[in-house]
Amino acid sequence: MKKIVILISGGGSNMAAIVRAAQREGWRERHGAAVAAVISNRADAGGLAFAREHRIATEVLDHKQFASREAFDAELASVVDRHQPALVVLAGFMRILTAGFVQRYEGRLLNIHPSLLPAFPGLHTHRRAIEMGCRFSGATVHQVTAELDFGPILEQAVVPVLPDDTPESLAARVLTQEHLIYPRAIARLLATA
């Protein structure tokens, strides 16, 4: 069984989209794959309840309990490794990972970013796209490398930036596309693995 471990920090809407796609598309039967665990750095992350409702193992590892980013990432890797993942999927995991963590899961660590990378890495992507006068924005699924929001692009979706858009309205439109392309990129990887 190819196990998928998903890391979240909040509501987990992308995680939920992945879980629903795995069930709807029969990833277990088609790809021999399943979401094995959802891990959060925040005990109050709303996505944990969704995972539990779907009988997915959950764990919480509070980053505030560690003296350094390296110490947290070392323990996070230990928790992730207990599930023997084929893929580690970042779905709104709001922590910058150390190079050591990224290297440990090289080639099987994925992220989604709410812009058309390489444009607008980092935070405030929607505000920045509007301020720059972009006519299009979108989302990118990519393999994670040590460089923030950089790495081989696996999938992208494009949405128009409308004249009356706010960062919130653009974010909502982009998010609907994230929910489509993230599961699709994962399924494609599973089919070739």
Image (cartoon, rainbow, N blue to C red):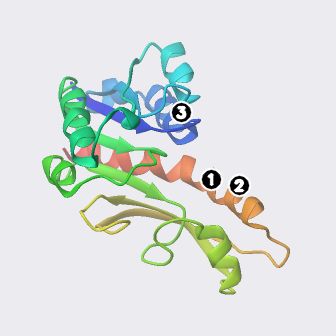
Q: Which residue is mark 2?
A: 172
In depth, the one of 106 and 94 nearer the eye is: 94
**Element marked by disc 1:** helix
Q: Is residue 36 left or right of residue 86?
A: right
Q: Quadrant of the N terminus?
A: top left
Q: Which kind of residue does numbered mark 3 sit on?
A: Ala
User: Is the C-beta separation of discs 2 and 3 under 8 Å?
Assistant: no
**Residue 128 vertical position relative to residue 70 in the rendered view, above or below:** below
Residues packed near mark 2 inside 10 Å, few (<14), some (14 to 19) or many (20 plus): few
Instruction: Examine the image and state in which quarter residue 172 appears.
Output: bottom right
Q: Nearer the viewer, residue 97 or 191?
A: 97
Residue drawn at x 19%, y 39% as measured from the top left: 74
Q: Amino acid under label 2? A: Ala
Q: Where residue 122 sits: x, y (%)?
A: 47, 67
Q: Which mark is residue 175?
A: 1
Between residues 60 and 12, which one lies in front from this camera angle? 60
Give the mark nearer the N terminus: 2 vs 3: 3
Give whichever of discs 1 and 3 has the lower sequence position.
3
Q: Which residue position is annotated with label 3? A: 16
- Position of 22 with respect to 179 (left or right) is left
The kind of residue on which mark 1 rests is: Leu
Give percent across and percent down for residue 19.
47, 30
Residue beneath the point at 32% across and 31% down: 30
